[in-house]
Image: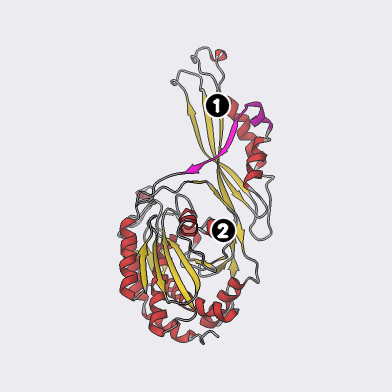
Amino acid sequence: MAKQIPFNAILEKSKQYEKEMTRFLRDMIAIPSESSDEKRVVHRIKEEMEKVGFDKVEIDPMGNVLGYIGHGPRLVAMDAHIDTVGIGNIKNWNFDPYEGMETDELIGGRGASDQEGGMASMVYAGKIIKDLGLEDDYTLLVTGTVQEEDCDGLCWQYIIEQSGIRPEFVVSTEPTDCQIYRGQRGRMEIRVEVQGVSCHGSAPERGDNAIFKMAPILTELEQLSHKLGDDEFLGKGTLTVSEIFFTSPSRCAVADSCAVSIDRRLTWGETWEGALEEIRALPAVKKAAAVVSMYNYERPSWTGLVYPTECYFPTWKVEENHFTVRALSNAYEGLFGKAPVVDKWTFSTNGVSIMGRHGIPVIGFGPGKEPEAHAPNEKTWKSHLVTCAAMYAAIPLSWLATE
């Protein structure tokens, strides 16, 4: 039988560690850590895990940092990706994105919400577990994962497929505004390419203009976007053209190729095969003999490791009465005396691999808010760090007690 959960003591400890979590988060923000350039922040996280008393800390061949608390037979994991996107146009920032900003309530900087705040709360949840002797028949794995912004879920494909690590479930600490999130739409990165024949621009009738051939395809793609699947919980599938490319001998010539990239969001019941085939079936695609394909990802991690994958990120959700929802709801009610809000992400997470590809249940609870992600003047809330650290410390015992 699981131990009694000392909710009040957990929450009090979490409040006591607000300053330490703030300092640690600001240290991470200060280290630029875009995808494939996470080495310094990974080592900073390893240092903090060791400092607060994790039982084992290691960096795997891909460059993910893995910290363990406890020695029980049952494995539960909590995940934060620790890479960030770039800063964009610096003129849109009111403060330096790496020096950051701090007030009594807020912490600002690139990665504050998306999603180094989750890492700060997880590490200090580990310390709370140690402080209060909350170890039991579980081992807690805390992961700081790489390359998520480039290729969501690739890090966990490696962890599961190559390291052979399969937790019973995973808590994603992506930003949820301290609500419980139980799913997300999937996505694909699709390329549509047409070929033409170049000639001198003074006599375009001699050639075959690939850009003109692409034009009706774009119109039909827009029309298709209004006919995609829907799901009562996850919402509608979507399609948007995100990039366009061409080749031409010069500005005074007919273009001999044209291609577009499509960001396709998949709702429940939609498949990657179906998403490709519905584009291939468009009349303009057939007429132009366009090639419709899925992109691949082969960028080396910061360690130099290449782990290729196709750019398909499956849809996933757990049901309302799933044990993960119950375990987190019970922990939340025990700590805060009220029922949590249960919702979903709009964006994508590592859950596409953990649950979408490998069937390991995922549940979300994280500090920060989705609209802060990838935005200038990104910020998070100190109160969120406290709330989440308390939750992460309570979740393992709440899980054991829920069964």
Residue occupying image coordinates x 64% and y 31%: 285
- Mark 1 or mark 2, earlier in chain: 1
Front residue (pair 257, 86): 257
For badge 2, the amino acid type reads His
Return the residue at label 1. Answer: 211
- Where in the figure is residue 322, as x and y percent of width and height? 63, 70
Return the residue at label 2. Answer: 358
For badge 1, the amino acid type reads Ile
Q: In the visual, does 348 lie left or right of 115?
A: right
Front residue (pair 369, 161): 161
- For marks 1 and 2, give the one nearer the viewer: 2
- Is residue 286 part of the magenta span, yes or no? yes
Q: Which residues are magenta?
A: 283-297
Q: Is residue 333 above or below residue 47?
A: below
Front residue (pair 239, 196): 196
User: How crowded is the residue under tag 2: few (<14 C-alpha within 10 Å), some, or many (20+)?
Assistant: some
Q: Quadrant of residue 110?
A: bottom left
- Where in the figure is residue 165, as x and y percent of width and height? 48, 63
Circle 1 sits in a helix, a strand or a loop, which is it? helix
- Where in the figure is residue 45, as x and y percent of width and height? 34, 65
Front residue (pair 86, 3): 3
Q: Is residue 400 above or below residue 187?
A: below
User: How crowded is the residue under tag 1: few (<14 C-alpha within 10 Å), some, or many (20+)?
Assistant: many
Residue occupying image coordinates x 47% and y 50%: 151
